[in-house]
Image (cartoon, rainbow, N blue to C red):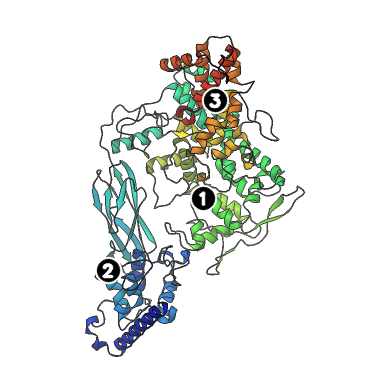
Amino acid sequence: MPAFHNTLRSRFLLRLTLLSLVGTLFPAVSPQFGQAAERSVSFVNDVMPVFTKSGCNMGVCHAKAGNGQNGFQLSLLGFEPTEDFEHLVKEARGRRLFAGTPDHSLLLLKATGQMPHGGGVRLNVSSESYSLLRDWIQQGAPYDKTETPKLVSFEVEPKRGSIQRRGEQQLKAVARYSDGSLRDVTGLALYECNDKAIADVTDHGLVKIADITGNVAVMVRFQGKVAVYSVSVPLGAPVENLPAVKNIVDELVFSNLKVLGIPPSPVCDDATFLRRVTLDVAGRLPTEEEATAFLASMESDKRDKLIDTLLRSPDYADYFASKWTALLKNRRDDASDVVSNFAFHAWVRDSLLANKPYDQFVRELLAATGNVIGNPPVAWYKRVQEPKQQLEDVAQLFLGVRMQCAQCHHHPFERWSQDDYYSLQAFFSQVGRKPSATRGEDLIFHKRGIAMATNIKTGAKLKPAALGDAIPAIAADQDPRLRLADWMSSKDNPFFAKSLVNRYWKHFFQRGLIEPEDDIRDTNPPTNPELLAALEKHFISSGFDLKELVRLITRSNAYQLSAQPNPYNLPDRQNYSRYYPRRLQAEVLLDSIDAVAQTQTDFANLPAGTRAVSLPDNSYNSSSAFLRVFGRPEGQSVCECERVQSSSLAQSLHLINASDIKAKLGSSTGRAERLAKDGKPVESKVRELYLAAFAREPRASELKTALDFLAESRVDAAGKPMDAQKAGRENFQDLIWALINTKEFLFNH
C-alpha cells in the first residue's frame, strides 16, 4: 500500500511539473488561466497579509517560533518578509510555486485543501485572498521593487464607541502608505477581543456584544502594526445616591459607573472596613482590643486615623516586604544563601518601614555594587545573573512590559523589536562579579568599558537604549544602570509609575486597571484610563511615595464599598462597583488561624512568635504543608501569578482534618483551653471569638446557635459522659474550627 501511494504521488508531481512547463512555454494553450494579471501584486503589502490572515505564519503552523511544519518556515506574523520570500520562492527547489499554472502551485493546492494539508483548508478558491496569491505567482512571484509603497500607519474606525448589550459594530481597518494612498484592509486585518465574556469579533471585524456590562478593547493588527478599538457597554440603570466623593479615586470610579449605568453597592460597615483594611495593609486580623475600640469610637475620621496607624506599624513593612521579596526572587537554593536572604529581606523591609521613595528603592536595587554585607540589594544579582534575565525581570516588574517574545522576533502584540530587546540588555552588559570574603557571595561591580549588546540574529552591536527613547552616549567609566534608573524615574516615563500604581491597585481591588498587572501595552488598554492616569500623576507628584498611594486608595469610598452586590452590579468584574472578595494569602491565613486559636507556628532558626508574613525567603515552604497547599510562592518568577489564590480540594481537606490544624485547636496553651477554664459568662466568650475572627459582634442568631452548641453534653469513645471541663474544651475547639472554615473567615470581603 505505501508503494502504491508513493507511485500516485510521483505521478501527480510529474503531472504538475509538466503542466508548469506547458504553461511556461505555451501560455496561450491554457486560456482558463488568462493572460498576465492587470494589477501588480506586492509581496509585502498583499501576499504577506494573506499568510497572516490565514494563520500560516502562526506558531502552531509554519512560523519559525513553532519550528515550522514539514520544513516550511515563515517569520512569526510576517515580521521578516525578506526571509519569508527566500523560504517560499527559493527553498525546496522552487516546487511550491508554478508560475505557468499558478492554480497548480503546491502553495495554493494545500491551502485550499486540494492536497493533504495538516493545517486544513485555509483559503477558498473564490476568495480575494486566493486571487491575490494566484496573480502574484502568475506574475513570476517577484519581490517588491524599491519604489513599492511602504506601510506608514494603520488605524481602525471608529476608535472608541458605546454599544448597547447584544448590539453590533462593524469596524473598518485602514492602511496608509508612503505614497499617500489609503487602503481598506478590513478583510485582511486580524481581530482579537481582550475580554471575550463581554464581546467577540468576527474575522471581518464585526464586533458582537454579549449581555455583560463593562469596557472591552478589540486589537486590530495588520503587517506588524496594531490599532485598538475601545468600547463601553452600558447597563443603563439609574445611578442615584452615590457615596460621597472623598478624593480623585471616587470621582473617577463613580463617574465611570454613571456612564455605564451601574449603581454601586453602599459603603461597608465599620467592622467590615476594619477587618478589610487591616488585612490589606498589615496582613493580619485586627485584635479583639482594636476591634472593640474601633467599633465603640464615635470619631468621624476614625477610618482615616486607622489607615495612618496601620501604615506606621511594623506589620505594614512585614507584609509588603513579603510581597516584594517574592517578586524579587529572594529564594534559598543553597545553605550558603542564608546570609543574602536575610540581608536582602531586611533591606526591603527597612526601606518600606522608612517609606523610602519608590524611585530611590529601584535605583539602589538596579545600580547595586559591593557585597551583600555592606550593600544588601546586590543580592538581587545573585538570583538574576544573566543580562537577558535582568532586562526581562526589570521590564516586567518595574515597567509592566513583557519583553521575552522580542528576544527571538518582533513582539506580536507590541512595537518592540529584537533591537529594542538587546538595546535594553546593553544596560546590564558591564555588570562584573568576583568572589567575595563571604562564602557563596559575589562582589558586584561596574566593569569599565563601552556598554554594548549583540543582536543574536543580525549580529548588530547595539548601545543602551530605553524603550521608545534614545539615551545620550555613556562614557566607559559611567555605570549604564544609573542612566537606566534616571530614565525610569523620569516624570515623563510612560511605564514606571503606571506599572506600580496598577500593581498596587490590584493589591487592594483584586483586579488591576490593566490586567494582567504586568502587561502594559497599547493593545491592552485600562478599563478606566482616566483613573489610571490620575493615579500615575498623583504618585509622581508625591515623590513616588508608596504610603501616600496606599493612603489615597484606602481612604476612598470606592475601596470601602460593600462586597454585597445589588441587583445591577452582580455581573460586574472590572468597574469596581463593589468590593471583590478574595481568599486570604497563604501566610496571612496561617497567621490568622494562629491569632484566633491563640497559638503560634514555629519556624526553624527564627525567634518564637515570628509571623508567616515575616519569613525572609521561600525555604520555609518545604517544612510547612500549610504554606505549600495554600500557594506561597517559591520566588521563581517576577509574575504575581506564581502566588496561588484559587481554592482547591486539598485546601479544604487541610482545613478540615490536617494534623497541624488539630494541634492548634487542641493546644494546651491555646484559646480553646483558656476559654474552657475561664469563669466569665459564655456569651462574652462567644463575643470574644467573633471579634477575633471577624472583627464584629455575633448576630443574635449566631449567638444563640453558639450558646446552644456549647451547652451540649458530650460522651467519650466508650459512650460515657465526659466531665464538664473536657467537654467544654472540645466544644470550644469545634466552635473555633467551625469559624475558621467559614467563607467569612477565609476571604477578605
Amino acid type shown at disc 2: Asn
**Where is mark 1, residue-wise?**
396
Q: Quadrant of residue 347?
A: top right
> Residue 149's spot in the image, x, y percent?
34, 71
Residue located 60% across and 53% down the image: 481
User: Does dot 2 land on a helix, a strand or a loop?
Assistant: loop
Which residue is more in the foreground, 647 or 203? 647
Residue placed at 30% from the left, 82% from the top?
A: 101
Would residue 271 appear left or right of 31 to someone viewing this image? Answer: right
Q: Is residue 199 positioned above or below 683 on the image?
A: below
Q: Give the structural element (helix, strand or loop) at label 1.
A: helix
Left or right, residue 677 beside residue 418 = right
What kind of element bears circle 3?
helix
Return the residue at label 3: 309
| In contact (CB < 8 Å): disc 3 and disc 1 | no
Q: Is residue 313 visible?
A: yes
Q: CA distance from mark 3 to mark 1?
A: 32 Å
